[in-house]
Amino acid sequence: MSPSQQPSSPNPTHLKIRFARRFLRALNNLNITKTSPDDDDDGENRVYRRSRRVKIAAYTAMASVVGSRRAWSRAVLWKVRNRSRNRSLLSVRPRRKRVDCKITNNDHDHAKVFVRRRNPNPKRDPFRDSGQVLKLRKLVPGAETMDSWCLMDETADYIKCLAAQVEVMKTLVDLYTTT
Amino acid sequence: MSSRRSRSRQSTTSSRISDDQINDLVSKLQQLLPEIRNRCSDKVSASKVLQETCNYIKSLHQEVDDLSERLSELLENTDSTQASIIRSLLTQ
């Protein structure tokens, strides 16, 4: 980790600029213009695949700006990396996401045991088994393996970054619509 | 990688976390939620904050989905030279 990295996102404007740069670079590489080679797909499938690629680019851009200092960004990057690895092995799309989930679930089981052992007094954790926490764990990437304190911290950072990314995307949509 | 180590150290101390720290985390989270940001923190329960957090993340995910679809449409229909000009302007 380089010393210039801050523990948390300090300046929202600065963050947005960095997200925008990364995202635009990724979009550039996607090359979603009319001349793309995968035009032989049927219409609906093609639209779906393209918007999915843009979506993945958005999350990846966000996570790679944050880098490895956050658990959620590590989880996103790991998932994306695994996705492209699986893709090179399987040329068809047999629900890749499910494979990813299986792996994380296994990790999750291990970590659960680990956390339980580490935390000698689980009653001190007021959010422990509440439904909201379980819901939150499904929404924040990599949250399956965190304890509640970590989860809250990661959630706060994730929300900040996600909101910034949404604004970046809105700005881009506006830019492309007006030109 | 040092962050991972410090994080696990952090969680070993989690059993010793005080009520103040709980409230601190909850109110920090509350500040990020537009729905309940301006409400007095005494009036909002922790579970309400968590519920709003879930809703907010879901709505942000939905927005990313919608915007991705919109962007991919726009990129497809934009003339490639025009698009690259915009990109180069923004990536300066």
Image (cartoon, rainbow, N blue to C red):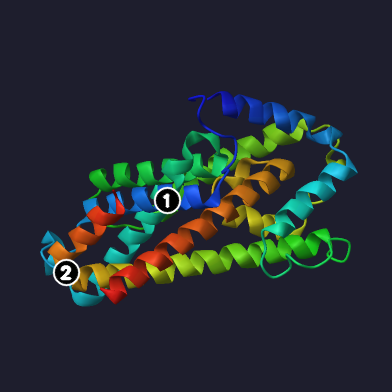
Q: What residue is rendered at 66% in x and 67% in y?
A: B34
Instruction: Estimate the spatial distance between the alpha carbons at disc 2 and disc 1, rounded to whole Å.
Output: 35 Å
Residue B44 screen position, x and y as percent: 83, 65
Label 1's element? Answer: helix
The chain letter under disc 1 is A
Residue A137: image tag: none
Q: Is residue A72 visible?
A: yes
* Residue on which the image places disc 2: A41
B4 sits left or right of B11 in the view: left
The residue at the point 49 percent across, 34 percent down is A68
Q: Is residue B16 above or below residue B65?
A: above
Left or right of B29 on screen, residue A48: left
User: A4 or A114: which is nearer to us?
Assistant: A4
Q: Nearer the viewer, mark 2 or mark 1?
A: 1
Please identify the quadrant where the C terminus of chain A is shown.
Answer: bottom left
Q: Amino acid at mark 1?
A: Ile
Q: Secondary structure at mark 2?
A: loop
Residue A125 showing in the rendered view? no
Give the image location of residue A31, x and y in percent: 19, 57
Q: Which mark is residue A17?
A: 1
Quadrant in the picture for residue A46: bottom left
Residue occupying image coordinates x 62% and y 66%: B56
* Percent position of residue A13, x then y: 50, 52
Q: Amino acid at mark 2?
A: Asp
